[in-house]
Image: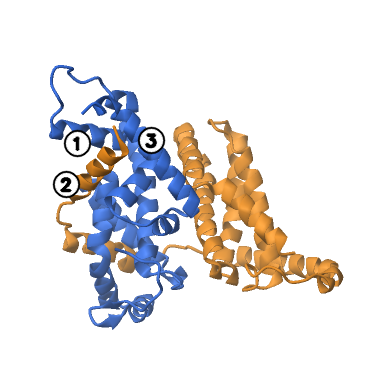
Chain colours: A blue, B orange
Amino acid sequence: MTGLAIKPALVGGTDEQTLITRVLDGDRGAARTLYEAHVHRVHRLVFRLCGDEELTHDLTQDVFIRAFDQLSRFRGEAAFSTWIHRIAVSVTLNGLRKVRRLRTRELSLEGASHVPDETSAPSDPELKERLTRAIEALPPGARASVILHDIEGYTHVEISAMLGIAVGTSKARLFDARVKLRQALADYARE
Amino acid sequence: MTDEKLQELLQEASRSWRVPPEPRVGEMWESIEAAHFDRPRQRLTPRWWVLVSAVAAALVFGVAIGRFSAVDRAAQPQIAVSRAGFQEPYGRQTTELLGQTAVLLAALPREGSEGAGQTRFAAQAEQLLVTTRLLLDSPVASDPRLRVLLEDLELVLAQVAQLPAASRRNAAELEIINEALEERDVVPRIRTAVASLSGDD
């Protein structure tokens, strides 16, 4: 889990700030070390947000290219992981917007909340599928809040840093998202 | 659906939902290395004469404002700390930028408009983008909240600046920009920052 506490992280026995300085001096080995320290977490976060393997592959590359291009602006007030996860969320949400325009296939909450067969209780896989569709139907900001907080386990402070919003906004978005999810799954309330 | 049941489902989802495949670490690295280290360096900073003009304008503006406000300032208690980390001209320049950007974004149409309008918005956005990037490399960026806001502005202004080039997809591009503004609460954050900076005066 990422943290906002500023403490010198060690990557492969080297202080992360030293690695960053070396990357800024053009050291490819240091860049590779920094990349390998964070790529799995970034890849996982991007995949959770977009759910498509090939898109995740492309977006993860974009995240690191952008991070290395902007590395001189990293001033170390927050952890490097927080900084790069913020870039990951930003790149992924922008990427998803573009992809959505191309594919024009956005699911609606109405589509997710169909009335199930009254005679039989829904099976767990069916409920999970409904939850997946309901999450995908959320507005991008609300979807990011649910995925980051409830599924990935980030705190509101971390999410606010990643999305560039106030902590209160993050909490409000999560509350709204949960209301929408409960509405989308309301017909299972009698379970 | 009760809160407890939803919580239970989400907890289960954290273990089983969208379990990521193993990343192709080496393959991705080759692309990243080629893009970052091997390509000709992309011009991320404005041309020198634009840079010099902007710095000169910022200094002249800052000195002028400083002279006008010097007398009153001496009598006022220093109550805020948010701008203490950077010098006065930068604070003024930031307030100016935020104000002008808020006006531009508020005037941005929700739907596609024709040629001259797009070009005007794009030209304004380009100017503001130059100032935003200068401020990102200035002491202003040492304030984490301002830096995050400026980074978001950089992204949005870059999109607006490219509107004419993307004229065929203009409506879609505008929608993307407007969604980004809404999703990241950009305009309310500008207002808050301006209020905060003004409160320091």
Quadrant of image for the N terminus of chain A: bottom left
Q: Are marks 1 and 3 on the same chain?
A: yes
Q: Are marks 2 and 1 on the same chain?
A: no
Tell which subunit mark 3 falls on.
A
Determine whether label 2 and label 1 are within 8 Å by CB. yes
Is residue B63 among what the camera can see? yes
Between the C-alphas of marks 3 and 2, the distance is 22 Å
Name the one closer to the observer, A186 or A57: A186
User: Type of residue at label 3?
Assistant: Val
Question: What residue is shown at x 30% (from left), y 32% (from top)?
Answer: A103
Question: What residue is shown at x 62% (from left), y 40% (from top)?
Answer: B106
Residue hosting label 2? B16
Tell which subunit mark 1 falls on.
A
Quadrant of image for the C terminus of chain A: top left
Is residue B97 among what the camera can see? no
User: Type of residue at label 2?
Assistant: Ser
Residue hosting label 3? A179
Is A184 displayed left or right of A117 in the figure? right
Question: What residue is shown at x 80% (from left), y 67% (from top)?
Answer: B64
Name the one closer to the observer, B40 or A140: A140
